Amino acid sequence: MKQYGVNELRKMFLEFFEGKEHLAMKSFSLVPHNDNSLLLINSGMAPLKPYFTGQEIPPRKRVTTCQKCIRTGDIENIGKTARHGTFFEMLGNFSFGDYFKHEAIAWSWEFLTEVVGLEADRLYPSVYLEDDEAFDIWNKEIGIPAERIYRFGKEDNFWEHGSGPCGPCSEIYYDRGEKYGCGKPDCKVGCECDRYIEVWNNVFTQFESDGKGNYAELEQKNIDTGMGLERLATVVQDVDSIFDVDTIQALSRKVCEISGKEYKKKYEWDVSIRIVTDHIRSAAFMISDGIMPTNEGRGYVLRRIIRRAARHGRLLGVEGQFLADLSKTVIEGSKDGYPELEEKKDFIFNVLTQEETKFNKTIDQGLVILGEMEASMEKDGVKELAGGDAFKLYDTYGFPLDLTKEILEEKGFTVDEKSFAEAMQEQKVKARSARKATNYMGADVTVYESIDPAVTTQFVGYDRLVHDSKIIVLTTETELAEALTDGEMGTIFVEETPFYATMGGQSADIGVIYAGDSQFEVVDTVKLLGGKVGHIGKVKKGMFKVGDKVTLSVDEQRRADTCKNHSATHLLQKALRTVLGTHVEQAGSFVDGDRLRFDFSHFSAMTEEEIAKVEQIVNEKIEQSLPVFTSIMTIEEAKKGGAMALFGEKYGETVRVVKMGDFSTELCGGTHVANTGAISAFKIISESGVAAGVRRIEALTGAGVFHYYAELEKTLEEAAKAVKATPASLVEKLEHLMAEIKALQSENESLKSKAAKEALGDVMDQVKEIKGVKLLAAKVSGVDMNGLRDLGDQLKEKLKEGVVVLLSEEAGKVNMIAMATEGAVAKGAHAGNLIKGIAALVGGGGGGRPNMAQAGGKNPQGIDAAITESEKVLETQII
């Protein structure tokens, strides 16, 4: 048997099924599209759900994919065994109401035995216990002896996900030989050891389940088959695990090289090597799909994966940052199948570097907190760290439990893992209860689910704003309808529309639909599954019926202003890449008739000079009146032409390319100006951070810019008027006023200091000696905190060495400070703890450093008691 590489096997599989009239589709993004039930794509069929449910018509009834997937349900086991991984590729062939069991079984056998060359006598099929049809196909058509076909129950060979489509499975196992077995005499298919490994799973979507144990035969039966690419490579290359196949082994060898550790030499090393190897693959692929590290959702999954990899790098002895460099090996090994890795490599490097830097600071912070917990345990004579404290380290500081345990064990401490697990479970319950209940597709059920999937709408609004069409579907807010009458809210669907539905960051068109004298005001336009466009609004007068001929009229001014803002975002993106660098990628945008918002990847705030330069470039391109051309071409042609593709976007076989002169070329389905001169003007009004590594620019165009400057001019005139100046002399006038204010403040502070001294009087005779340390504790009235600090400094200077405590009643409240000289601190005095010790007597709280602390209180009656208490507190401090 030839030992094919991972990239070869992927190509062989897709080409095999293309030869069986399947459409080979590119891997979908790891970010689910219109599916709230998943954080990340975790199977080959997950992105194809709409085709299986009939909510969307597939591009072809036969489809094949190699889908990148992430599963983190058992992340704690990653590394501990050689079979677990968070990232994997899933090969799949799918039928939507076309072929069924006969073809699926025959082709799976043909590919494994004839194309890949696996030995037939080492392959064992399994079927669902009650699936006699599949058994007969394997036995009578493929020719597998009955004793080599295994029947398994529901738990193993029946695919079911609550209510909805479900069905029996037929798996194919490969016998890897006795060297991988458990040695038991009854070792066979189904044994938990590594000898018999599942390489293929045919899922026959045959029934509709009501979730209560009742199954109805589906009219349209589907095929969903899957095969882990890495697992197949493990068998074909006859290696121990997925970590030994060619592409992954190249990565684990790199980990060994930078760490100086040898794989399969020491269990602890192996665990860390496998974790780093697996996690850097997941991280690189997730970042290439636009996922950023955050503290929630899929961003948290990414952050956790990156931090686990960084931490295990430390355990292996890797010094300094290494993840970005390691990701180069991931990109090199997988770019043939996933060119987006190469396209986004600079972005991947930047995100990994930034996150690893943050984690290095975080883990150091966690060590400090853990050190404080250890000190507290030693003081209290406790040998076990409370689970709640361990969970706080884990949840707040990203400090893994195993690292906490490892550090504590070295010093003879343990962790209450039971209460840690309880705290973890409590968090999971809270997270689950916060999730919304959804249907099979992970979306809230709406009236639109009832519309025939074959209904679709053609958009004709690129070159026209008024168009005649026919109503094909009407809905109220809750159900399908034959008619909508005066005053009713609802949605109109037509065959062709000039209305642009909210997509790609561009807001929807609004306008009016007419049918004779009847009028329907469109307040929103939405794009639904299957290419349906819904015009949401209210009947202003008359009636609309299914079948009516109607005229659709888009609000012309709003469309024009939206086009200006949308075209300006294209110029802005290119200008940002020119000024900041090619790592800049769009991370989100929104344009409407009023303004534009553009989010982009960048790891620091832009300087005033950078903002000014970007603004200048955009306005230069507007002034040059660049022609705006659009064309339809294949995605490959577009990329060759330099078109920018967006993160997370779902592109078909052909794409629309928007080109502005020779300056900007992007894939975009939105509406634009015909010439950049129509934008008129561009002004950035803000630049801010919205997430880790993501910045946001808000800007105006056209009339919005002129309105912005008109408002600024109005504000300037009002400000000048308020200080009895003209706009031209306003700066000079303000500078003069600021000088006057500064002089008055200085005079005021001087008077307050003088008044405070007078109020305090000569208090040096109140100095007491506490165990050899001088203490001056006194009260003064009507002095604020600034005044108390000035007094304290003066008295400390007079005292030379010792402690000063001052309390003042001001407006019914208490201000207090404590100061200690270096000599007093050396003898044990601590101003912060002293303040803590007396603050409660005046109804307050506070603290600070050993040499200086301050606090406030609400009970002036306690001032005398606090002064007396300060002597006792200081006495406990002095050594």
Image: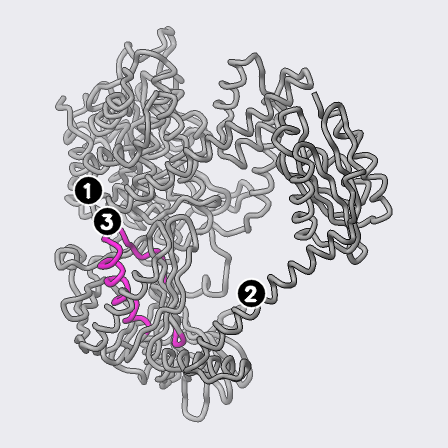
Mark 1 secondary-structure assignment: helix
Judge left or right: residue 260 versus residue 443.
left
Numbered mark located on residue 17 in the image: 1
Q: CA distance from mark 1 to mark 2?
A: 81 Å
Which portion, as a residue range, is magenta? 565-594
Would residue 841 be visible to someone looking at this image?
yes
Residue located beneath label 3 in the image = 25
Mark 2 secondary-structure assignment: helix
Judge left or right: residue 807 versus residue 640.
right
- Most foreground residue, 364 or 274: 364
Numbered mark located on residue 742 in the image: 2
Check if residue 26 falls in the magenta segment. Answer: no
Asked if 280 appears above or below 806 in the picture, the reply is above
Q: Give the amino acid type for the residue marked by disc 3 in the picture.
A: Met
Mark 3 secondary-structure assignment: strand
Residue 670 in which image quadrant: bottom left
